[in-house]
């Protein structure tokens, strides 16, 4: 019977080097999400709260929560961005509730001064738009923020506010129409 | 996706109006910087103007947030009270998907209930064992052939009942004893006991042990009601005054004994020392109510007897005297009968029936010789399966309602929280 030799015969020294820890898939995905969504989340939260200081706190809190829950993301339930904005929305609504309990929301004054390069007509239109936006309800403001400040698709907006895409589109169109009319009237 | 949301989406499944859809597409196109049809110029300008209103991130805040993100969002104020391992565990739990968290919680609850039920089952089993002591003999491979006949009653190791001292009979009771307090609260509890002992020994020691059994019984002033010794296979059935169901042909001996109750444990201990104890069981039965019934019956009958005697002294006609005498005879007979029953009950309490079996090792009889064979293994395996299934069933009975309640509570809490958040927008 033929005896097989040892496979490690002749080996005098085994050299092993510690493998560099590879970042987990969830960590990489979160980093990408953070880089692509930081300003959008802030824009959405600030548009909803109309308070930059509070928006900064809520944005930081939202990203922190998302980081802690990064492994719980389920792609079957929507996009990564929709998931993140859902977390941000909850944090923003909690902040709104907290503020409503403490005192009336103090809105930051809107800078109505036209830019140096803007013409009078543009300045007028901008002022009219800001005026119209300041009169929007919180729900309407949220839709505008999600669409125009955060850049979400209608599908993602529907996921964030837990409704159907059709319903989200209809409601969004209604708000746009409202702003449109307000601007037209001002013009 | 949450369940109610799915339902809500189905509710408004109507399609967008064509005009609305076109304008929304135009908005998307304008935001993406696409060139649109001139009809949508105004809408596109509005969309871009709205987008331009987006609050810009403060650079200082952005840098700070980037720094925190790079560091993995460390908590600003570490909780000094909670150990690092606890904090890490809570973070891991928070990072789990709700379904996984539920599954983990369910598994933990199941484990907890199963352990609890198992402990409970084991505890109750131990309690039962305390009243019915069973000792299992060590397996042995000793075997021996046996030949010969069977001796029973007066033969061999059997002992004549007359040769042993009998307990003093207590058949007669005075009327005074019957008039004693008869309520259970005032009467001490009357407990009837019984015991069974199975011993295993070498085939050549069966007769010696049988003889020792009778000696021990005599020592404790007990009584051998019946005995039988079977010498081996093919032997004829025992022929005694009270043959025992021991006709399998296996080498061994059987005894029906009566031991005074106050000496039962000592007698059993001595009997247990005669061989290897295969099993030892003791049982008790409360017969206080029977005592009370019989005593009440005796008292009633004695009252009736006294009344009849009183009537007899006042009877004038011969017919009345005869009738009273006839009834008096019946009542006296019934009193005797009831007192006999009371005597039996008292004797049942005072004297304990004990069944002793002596089995020869390797005889293949109906007694367990302590060996462990395939049948025993199958029996044990079946027992384990039955107990396991029982534990599982009890666990399910506890877990399923709890899980239902927890699920409903979870739905209610999440719905309430969501509604409260939504109210912030109103």
Image (cartoon, rainbow, N blue to C red):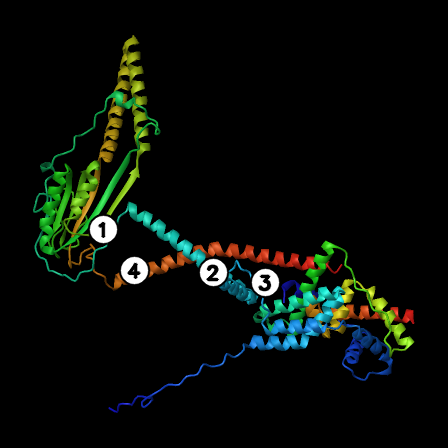
Residue situated in front as seen by the camera: B338 or B2:
B2
Kindly report the distance in space between the C-alpha atoms of the residues bearing marks 2 and 4: 32 Å
Q: Are marks 1 and 2 in contact (CB under 8 Å)?
A: no
Q: Nearer the viewer, mark 2 or mark 4?
A: 2
Q: Earlier in the sequence, mark 1 or mark 4?
A: 1
Please tell me which of labels 3 and 2 falls first in the chain.
3
Query: What numbered label is drawn on residue B108?
Result: 2
* Mark 3 burial class by Cα count in 10 Å: few <14, some 14-19, many 20+: few
What residue is disc 1 on? Answer: B279
Where residue B302 appears, as percent x and y from the top left, is 29, 20
Position of residue B332 measured from the top left corner of the image (x, y, whole percent) = 25, 21
Which one is closest to the eye, mark 3 or mark 4?
3
Q: Which residue is mark 4?
A: B379
* Chain letter for mark 2: B
Residue at x 88%, y 68% (from the top left corner) = A182
Are tags 3 and 2 found on a single chain?
yes
Residue B227 in the figure: left or right of residue B419: left
Q: Mark number for residue B77?
A: 3
Q: Is B276 located above or below residue B214 in the figure? A: below
Residue at the spot 73% in from the left edge and 59% down from the top edge: B424
């Amino acid at each position: 019977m033929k005896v097989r030799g040892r496979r490690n015969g002749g080996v005098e020294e085994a050299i092993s080097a510690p493998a560099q820890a590879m970042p987990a898939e969830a960590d990489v995905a979160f980093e990408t999400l953070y880089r692509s969504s930081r300003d959008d989340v802030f824009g959405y939260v600030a548009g909803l709260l109309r308070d930059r200081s509070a928006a900064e706190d809520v944005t930081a809190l939202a990203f922190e929560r998302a980081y802690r829950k990064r492994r719980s993301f389920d792609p079957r339930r929507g996009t990564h961005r929709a998931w993140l904005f859902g977390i941000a929305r909850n944090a923003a609504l909690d902040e709104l509730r907290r503020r409503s309990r403490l005192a009336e929301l103090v809105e930051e004054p809107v800078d109505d001064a036209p830019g140096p390069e803007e013409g009078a007509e543009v300045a007028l239109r901008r002022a009219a738009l800001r005026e119209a936006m300041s009169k929007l309800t919180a729900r309407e403001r949220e839709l505008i923020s999600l669409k125009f400040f955060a850049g979400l698709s209608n599908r993602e907006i529907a996921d964030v506010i837990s409704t159907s895409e059709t319903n989200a589109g209809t409601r969004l169109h209604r708000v746009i129409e409202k702003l449109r009319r307000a601007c037209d009237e001002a013009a | 996706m949450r369940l109610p949301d799915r339902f809500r989406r189905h509710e408004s499944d109507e399609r967008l109006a064509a005009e609305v859809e076109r304008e929304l597409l135009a908005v998307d196109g304008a935001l993406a910087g696409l060139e649109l049809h001139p009809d949508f110029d105004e809408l596109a300008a509005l969309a871009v103007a709205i987008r331009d209103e987006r609050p810009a991130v403060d650079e200082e805040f952005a840098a700070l947030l980037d720094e925190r993100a790079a560091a993995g969002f460390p908590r600003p104020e570490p909780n000094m009270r909670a150990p690092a391992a606890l904090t890490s565990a809570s973070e891991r739990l928070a990072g789990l998907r709700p379904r996984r968290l539920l599954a983990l919680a369910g598994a933990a609850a199941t484990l907890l209930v199963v352990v609890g039920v198992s402990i409970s089952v084991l505890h109750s089993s131990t309690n039962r064992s305390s009243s019915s002591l069973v000792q299992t003999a060590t397996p042995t491979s000793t075997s021996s052939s046996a030949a010969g006949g069977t001796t029973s009653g007066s033969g061999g190791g059997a002992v004549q009942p007359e040769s042993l001292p009998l307990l003093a009979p207590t058949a007669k009771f005075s009327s005074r004893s019957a008039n004693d307090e008869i309520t259970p609260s005032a009467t001490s509890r009357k407990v009837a006991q019984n015991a069974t002992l199975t011993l295993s020994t070498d085939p050549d020691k069966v007769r010696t042990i049988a003889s020792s059994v009778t000696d021990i019984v005599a020592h404790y002033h007990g009584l051998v009601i019946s005995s039988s010794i079977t010498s081996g296979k093919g032997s004829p059935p025992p022929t005694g005054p009270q043959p025992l169901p021991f006709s399998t042909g296996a080498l061994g001996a059987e005894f029906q004994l009566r031991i005074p109750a106050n000496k039962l444990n000592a007698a059993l201990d001595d009997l247990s020392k005669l061989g290897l104890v295969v099993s030892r069981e003791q049982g008790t039965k409360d017969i206080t109510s029977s005592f009370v019934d019989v005593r009440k019956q005796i008292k009633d009958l004695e009252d009736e007897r006294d009344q009849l005697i009183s009537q007899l002294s006042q009877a004038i006609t011969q017919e009345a005297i005869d009738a009273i005498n006839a009834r008096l005879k019946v009542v006296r007979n019934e009193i005797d009968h009831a007192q006999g029953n009371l005597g039996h009950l008292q004797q049942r309490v005072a004297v304990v029936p004990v069944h002793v079996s002596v089995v020869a090792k390797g005889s293949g009889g109906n007694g367990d010789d302590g060996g462990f064979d395939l049948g025993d293994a199958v029996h044990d395996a079946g027992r384990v399966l039955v107990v396991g299934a029982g534990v599982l069933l009890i666990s399910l009975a506890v877990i399923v309602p709890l899980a239902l309640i927890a699920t409903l509570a979870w739905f209610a809490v999440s719905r309430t929280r969501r509604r409260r958040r939504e109210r912030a927008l109103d």
